[in-house]
Amino acid sequence: MAITGRLLGSGRAADVYEIDGAWVLRRDREGWGDALAEGAVMEHVRAHDYPVPRVRLADSSRTELVMERLSGPTMLQAVGEGLIAPREAGELLAGLLRKLHAVPPRQSGRGRILHLDLHPDNVMLTPDGPRVIDWSNTEEGDPGLDWGTSAVILAQVAVGDEEFAGVARAGLAGLLADPCALTEEGLAEARRRRAVNPTMSAREVEVLGAAEDLIRAFLP
């Protein structure tokens, strides 16, 4: 276990602590994931010039991941502060999905590498450009599922959160602008997975039908 400093932030299932000026530790509170496997995927995509934080696998464990400390706001914070327009944020997400799916898979014949949680709060806008974080859901498969997952996440906010609905709707429009690799199969599977995700609130599950309808309104 790495020696940590102050708590820097918390998500639905993990906490992030400072180690020093260059490194942080993300600790899984629930014990669901595999941080070593996640870190190995991050190192693989980074080797192919995909923008992710560096990781120290030798100092990580199944529940703890030591990674590069990044500076800058999340994309979500940047949108809230008016530093980036919501539609531009959606277009940036689309570009990150396309770039990710161009990375060779780690296992031959398993499709492409998928993030499966790419949304504005999982992109850090650093002085050196965007960096994609939180690879705890990553797997290899059909890129359409990755597009579907990002679209459903944004659409759930667009139809279920009055405060951020307009922002999420504009981001969704940017995400689904051409070229978009969303498929019927990917959208259906993304909705199914979100419905059984244990981190979803009852309200988030309730709006899935409306979220899918909104996504389809943006498609040709």
Image (tube, rainbow, N blue to C red):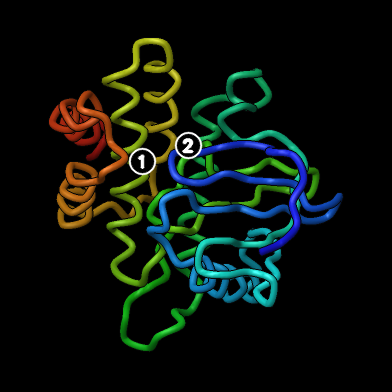
Instruction: Please tell me which residue lies in front, 145 or 202.
Output: 202
Whichever of callouts 1 and 2 sits on the residue coming sooner in the sequence is: 2
Amino acid type assigned to the residue bearing label 1 in the image: Leu
Callout 2 crowding tier (Cα within 10 Å): few <14, some 14–19, many ≥20? many
Answer with left or right where residue 185 lies relative to residue 94: left
Answer with left or right where residue 94 lies relative to residue 22: left
Q: Secondary structure at mark 2?
A: helix
Task: State if disc 2 and disc 1 touch (CB < 8 Å).
Answer: yes
| Residue 68 picture location, percent across and down | 74, 57
Quadrant where the C terminus is found in the figure: top left
Q: Which mark is residue 123?
A: none
Quarter of the view holding residue 219: top left
Instruction: Please tell me which residue lies in front, 148 or 219.
Output: 148
Residue with the mark numbered 1: 176
Residue with the mark numbered 2: 90
Distance from label 1 to label 2 (Cα)?
A: 8 Å
Q: Residue at x 37, y 44 (%)?
A: 150
Quarter of the view holding residue 173: top left
Instruction: Please tell me which residue lies in front, 165 or 177.
Output: 165
| Residue 213 picture location, percent across and down | 16, 30
Q: Secondary structure at mark 1?
A: loop
| Residue 166 picture location, percent across and down | 40, 16
